Image (cartoon, rainbow, N blue to C red):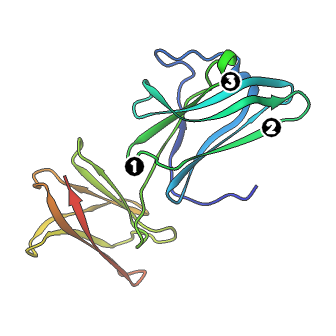
């Protein structure tokens, strides 16, 4: 299967969370994964040969505790002779926060919970994650570009510098937005080592 490279973070949560019971589902599943592909999240899993269930509900949560259904596979799932693979696309993922996914497999119980952070990318290739609680704006560079000694700055629309970002990794910058009023700001990002400059208007709530 061809893999698509994307910037994402996936983690497996502990087998037991409050209110979640792991039953036979965790024993019959193989490779339950979540992967960001452009503006969607691709979920894939395989039911091992010799196992069936009557329908599967795909569920998502913003906190890992309270889940809601976002899709389903109707009818008999799985096969008595061969392993059977399933793919589901979350076309409206939650931007900028950790999303948790699980499968409700009826009498087989719930699958393990997996999660990722969906990073929304613009047409210029930049990914922006604005955390209003932590008062942080994280800027992700397009694939293949490195931060290096680049400078990242926020200006108000009057041209006044209001914040500068620290390098938070090889391909990201993080601004502190503490004290900034809700408004539109101008993001200026210059990558001299790559000969690239980005300018974009950013809304900070």
- Whole-number angstrom distance, CA of label 2 to CA of label 3: 15 Å
Q: Nearer the viewer, residue 12 or 113?
A: 113
Query: Percent position (x, y) of residue 184?
Result: 17, 64
Q: Which residue is drawn at the image coordinates 76% and 30% (left, top)?
A: 77
Residue 95's tag is 1
Name the mark on residue 70: none
170 w.r.t. 94: above or below? below
Q: Which comes before the other along the chain, label 2 or label 1?
A: 2
Closer to the observer: label 2 or label 3? 2
Name the front one of labels 3 and 1.
1
Q: Nearer the viewer, residue 35 or 92?
A: 92
Q: Which residue is mark 2?
A: 84
Residue that carries the numbered disc 3 in the rendered image: 26
Q: Is residue 32 above or below residue 121?
A: above
Counting residues from the N terminus, which is met first, the one under dot 3 or under dot 1? 3
The residue at the point 63 percent across, 60 percent down is: 4
Q: Residue at x 61, y 22 (%)?
A: 110
The quarter of the image holding the N terminus is bottom right
Q: Secondary structure at mark 1?
A: loop
In the picture, residue 46 is in which quadrant?
A: top right
| Separation of marks 2 and 1 at Cα, in angstroms | 30 Å
Sort mark 3 into few (<14), some (14-19) or many (20+) by Cα contacts within 10 Å: some
Q: Alpha-carbon distance for marks 3 and 1?
A: 28 Å
Vertical relation: 151 (above or below) 138: below
Horizontal side, residue 53 vs residue 136: left or right: right
Within 10 angstroms of label 2, few (less than 14), some, or many (20 or more) residues? Answer: some
Give the secondary structure at mark 3: helix
Q: How far across and down, in percent of the image, does residue 84 sit?
A: 80, 37
Q: Are marks 2 and 3 in contact (CB under 8 Å)?
A: no
Q: Are marks 3 and 1 in contact (CB under 8 Å)?
A: no
Check if mark 2's residue and mark 1's residue have beta carbons within 8 Å: no
Residue 148 in percent (x, y) is at 39, 71
């Amino acid at each position: 299967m061809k893999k698509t490279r994307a910037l994402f973070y996936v983690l497996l949560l502990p087998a037991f969370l409050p209110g979640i019971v792991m039953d036979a589902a965790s024993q019959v599943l193989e490779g339950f994964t979540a992967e960001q592909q452009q503006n969607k999240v691709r979920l894939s899993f395989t039911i091992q040969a010799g196992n069936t269930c009557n329908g599967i509900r795909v569920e998502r949560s913003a906190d890992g505790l309270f889940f809601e259904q976002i899709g389903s596979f109707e009818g008999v799932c799985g096969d008595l002779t061969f392993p059977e693979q399933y793919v589901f696309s979350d076309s409206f993922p939650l931007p900028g926060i950790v999303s948790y996914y699980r499968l409700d497999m009826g009498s087989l119980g719930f699958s393990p919970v997996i999660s990722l952070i969906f990073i929304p990318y613009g047409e210029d290739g930049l990914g922006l994650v604005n955390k209003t609680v932590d008062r942080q704006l994280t800027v992700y560079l397009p694939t293949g570009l490195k931060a290096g000694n680049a400078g990242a700055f926020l200006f108000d629309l009057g041209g006044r510098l209001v914040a500068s970002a620290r390098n938070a990794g090889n391909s990201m910058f993080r601004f502190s937005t503490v004290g900034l009023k809700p408004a539109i700001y101008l993001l200026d990002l210059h990558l001299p080592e790559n000969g690239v400059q980005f300018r974009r208007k950013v809304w900070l709530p």
